[in-house]
Structure formats: structure tokens, C-alpha cells
Image: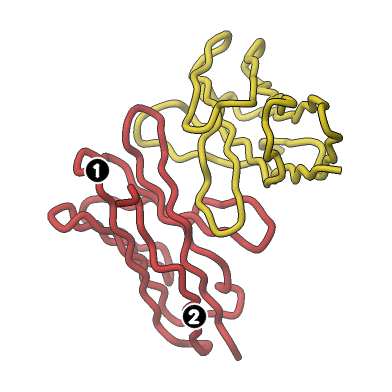
Chain colours: A red, B yellow
């Protein structure tokens, strides 16, 4: 089983739609969780950290479910500019981040 | 502007040649990392360094070498022993504390000639 698993997609949604991605992780001792966004042929950029109580940043909401070992990302009112690959990232041992392979989102007019 | 600078953006390697990828940061971060990204795969950790003059192997260190002589700099050498070097190489840095995210440079694309 992979340490971090994501549905590769693509998720095709119209502008204005709400879309959610899940990510599962295998190491129950994982302590930190992040969502990164990566545009085609570019570097990953931090979208948001994921906190135990869940957190929101504008149109983006992240949730953590430790019992079921998954994190989620919800995007409301999708924009064309949200089209990208979203990487789920989990911190395992000291300083080591484990990256999922990403979920591709395509927002169409 | 604070950030992480990688150079060059594109690099071509001949058979049997060693090449060095540069990574410089002015964020005063303690920890620095090198990742490799292949199509359809997640980022894989090559080497990381938590402090100057110290570094550790990641998951795929074979065929690579690094140095950390200065806090700001963490160059990666892709040696001739790395038989499949074509990939997108990403350097990252972080404060080094447990819950701090990593921030990335804009990457170097390495190809074989």
C-alpha cells in the first residue's frame, strides 16, 4: 500500500461548481498534513496546512480525519484558475514529507 | 525578494558526465531538500540537510551527491552512476521545525543528450 494515495482524476467541473478531493495515508503516526498546488511543469506551491479541527482559507476548506486516516480538500465556486494538480502531503518521520501523486482538476467555462 | 533560486532551468547531460544543479535560498531556513519528480509519480526525496555540514540520504540517493558548506546553498551533483537522470529536480527549504511546510524553487529539468 502506498504511504499516501490520491485519486489521479482528472476531475472535470464547470465554473462555479464545488469539488472535493480525498487523500488517504497509511502511517497513523503522521503529525502534519498539507495541500500543495502544482501547475503544469511548475514547482509545487503550498495551498494550505491542514489542522486537526479543520480549517478554511477563502473558497478552500481542509479537513483531517485521524480515525479513518484521510484528509480532504473542498473547493467552492471553482474558478478557471483553479485548474491544476493538487498534491496531498503528509509528514511522517522527522522532516520527511511524503507526497501523493496528485489529483488533477480541470475547470471549464 | 526572499525565495529559493534554482539554476539552470534546463540542463542537458552527456553520457558519463557529472552535472551539478544549484540551489540557493535567502529565507534563512535551516533545512534544505532535493526531490526528483517523474511523470505520473509523486516527488521522491533524494537528499536532505538539517544544518550546515550535515546531510542525510533520502529514498533514492544512489547516483547523487550533495554538500552543505553554507546555510544558503545546497548543490546537487548528478553523477554518471545515475543511469536514468532525466527528470524534474526540485529544491525545497523549511524552517526545520516539525510542523513547518517546505517551500520550493522553480525546478531544473535535466535531460540526457
**Vertically, is B55 above or below B45?**
above
Q: How far across and how far down the image is residue B85, in percent?
A: 70, 39
* Picture disc at residue A91: none
Q: How far across and how far down the image is residue B49, in percent?
A: 52, 20
Residue B5 falls left or right of residue B97? right
- Chain letter of disc 1 in the image: A
Number of dots carrying numbers: 2
SS at mark 1?
loop
Q: Observer-nearest residue: B108 or A13?
A: B108
| Same chain for the residues under marks 2 and 1 in the image | yes
The quadrant of the image that shows the C terminus of chain A is: bottom right
Q: Observer-nearest residue: B3 or A40?
A: A40
Name the residue that disc number 2 marks. Answer: A78
Who's the residue at 35% across and 63% down the image? A56
Name the residue that disc number 1 marks. Answer: A27
Foreground mark, 2 or 1, reads 1
SS at mark 2?
loop
Who's the residue at 74% across and 26% down the image? B80
**Vertically, is A26 above or below A18?**
above
Q: Which quadrant of the view contains residue B75? A: top right
Amino acid at each position: 500500500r502506498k504511504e499516501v494515495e490520491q485519486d489521479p482524476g482528472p476531475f472535470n467541473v464547470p465554473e462555479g461548481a464545488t469539488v472535493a478531493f480525498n487523500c488517504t495515508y497509511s502511517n497513523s503516526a503522521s503529525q502534519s498534513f498539507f495541500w500543495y498546488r502544482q501547475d503544469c511543469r511548475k514547482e509545487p506551491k503550498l495551498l494550505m496546512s491542514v489542522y486537526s479541527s479543520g480549517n478554511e482559507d477563502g473558497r478552500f476548506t481542509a479537513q483531517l480525519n485521524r480515525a479513518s486516516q484521510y484528509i480532504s480538500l473542498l473547493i467552492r465556486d471553482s474558478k478557471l484558475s483553479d485548474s491544476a494538480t493538487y498534491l496531498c502531503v503528509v509528514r511522517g518521520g522527522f522532516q520527511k514529507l511524503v507526497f501523493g501523486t496528485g489529483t488533477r482538476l480541470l475547470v471549464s467555462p | 525578494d526572499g525565495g529559493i533560486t534554482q539554476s539552470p532551468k534546463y540542463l542537458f547531460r552527456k553520457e558519463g558526465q557529472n552535472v551539478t544543479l544549484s540551489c540557493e535560498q535567502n529565507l534563512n531556513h535551516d533545512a534544505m531538500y532535493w526531490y526528483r519528480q517523474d511523470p505520473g509519480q509523486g516527488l521522491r526525496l533524494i537528499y536532505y540537510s538539517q544544518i550546515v555540514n550535515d546531510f542525510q540520504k533520502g529514498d533514492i540517493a544512489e547516483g547523487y551527491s550533495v554538500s552543505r558548506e553554507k546555510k544558503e546553498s545546497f548543490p546537487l551533483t548528478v553523477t554518471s552512476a545515475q543511469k536514468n537522470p532525466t527528470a524534474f529536480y526540485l529544491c525545497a527549504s523549511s524552517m526545520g521545525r516539525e510542523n513547518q511546510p517546505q517551500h520550493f524553487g522553480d525546478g531544473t529539468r535535466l535531460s540526457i543528450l
